[in-house]
Amino acid sequence: MVFGQVVIGPPGSGKTTYCNGMSQFLSLIGRKVVVINLDPANDALPYDCAINIEDLIKLSDVMSEHSLGPNGGLVYCMDYLEKNIDWLEDKLKPLIDDHYLLFDFPGQVELFSLHTNARNIINRLIKKLDLRLTAMHLVDAHLCCDPGKYVSALLLSLSTMLHLELPHINVFSKIDLIENYGNLAFNLDFYTDVQDLSYLQYHLDQDPRSAKYRKLTKELCDVIDDFSLVNFTTLDIQDKESVGNLVKLIDKSNGYIFSSIDSSAVEFSKIAAAPLDWDYYRTAAVQEKYMKDDEVVQQKSRMQ
Ligand SMILES: Nc1nc2c(ncn2[C@@H]2O[C@H](COP(=O)(O)OP(=O)(O)OP(=O)(O)O)[C@@H](O)[C@H]2O)c(=O)[nH]1
Ligand SMILES: [Mg+2]
């Protein structure tokens, strides 16, 4: 079986940096890793990629030949890749025997929430090459600092999860920078665990622009609550502890932790039922590390 990650998220959320850091971490712990760059807009790659979409199609050529802007150009490139999926399969075949795969995808969110080309590419690879992939959805942590942006991040995460139908992990990336964007209204676990969203209403009402959409926002929050699917973990890609905790979660989601054990139901259930031992690290320790105490205003308790 072949394991790997599909790295997605809005532009600038840290996907390429993640692929670089994650490949270094996994190599250090003894896995053979390859990074596959499927983002034709990635200029300077920090990692050595085993496969590069640039060898198939160039964004600049597409833009000039078809008079498209960068967004339309990227959708075209993904369509082109879908039609030439054999090219990617042929390049992957010699690697899949003993490598862990990291796919660096473009940041256009519509590719993962509206269009079907990226989903078709992923599904075709999964079926043809028998891959076990987790979707790593990176969202910049600074979106927590504005309630409206936070609701948008939740909606985007939910629609991406429903669209891709893969094992899925949402990550607040760049958590080390969270202090730079002002105070959080609640403790970090409010944002990571997507706790009662009705508490956000008070903060949304503080901004006249979002107060105008009060009813709409409430309905959207109800949709997110009803699905009960979205939660987040946090990541500072430069911190090996943070990356290590994430790797444990990914290995559980795509089944990597089961790959070396006998196919006995008892052994499987022992691992599957084991508690995650890093709940504390997911929120409280991260908050302690990256945010000063007085930065978190406990509005929740004040409002009760
Ligand atoms: N401090 C900090 N900076 C980060 C982290 N991850 C990424 N960055 C920075 O965020 C910026 C954008 O990172 P990229 O990896 O290029 O993001 P991307 O999602 O690949 O961007 P596009 O390919 O344009 O969609 C770069 O300047 C990175 O150095 C992180 O965990 N911490
Ligand atoms: Mg990138």
Image: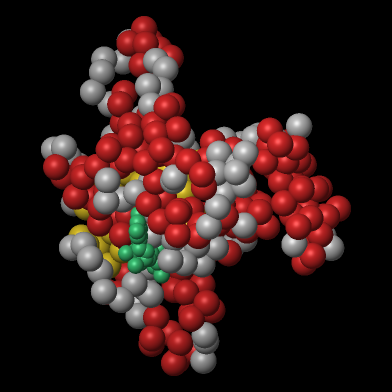
- Residue 267 visible in the shown view: yes
Tell whether 200 sits left or right of 92: right
Instruction: Residue 61: give x, y in percent of width and height.
Output: 38, 87
Give the residue displayed 18% in from the left and 63% down from the top. 48
- Residue 118 visible in the shown view: no
In the rendered image, the residue lying farthest to the front is: 294
Instruction: Residue 102: give x, y in percent of width and height.
Output: 30, 51
Give the residue displayed 68% in from the left and 33% down from the top. 301
Query: Relative to 272, is 190 above or below?
Result: below
- Report how many numbered discs are placed on residues in the image: 0
Query: Relative to 173, is 267 above or below?
Result: above
Tell whether 289 sits left or right of 9: left
Give the residue displayed 50% in from the left and 60% down from the top. 181
Determine which quarter of the picture holds residue 97: top left
Give the residue displayed 37% in from the left and 52% down from the top. 176
Classify the position of the N terminus by image quarter. top left
Classify the position of the C terminus by image quarter. top right
Instruction: Residue 84: give x, y in percent of width and height.
Output: 39, 67
Query: Relative to 227, is 112 above or below?
Result: below
Instruction: Residue 256: give x, y in percent of width and height.
Output: 31, 31
In the rendered image, the residue lying farthest to the top is: 266
What colour scheme governs how the chains and residues are painted in the rendered image of this protein? secondary structure
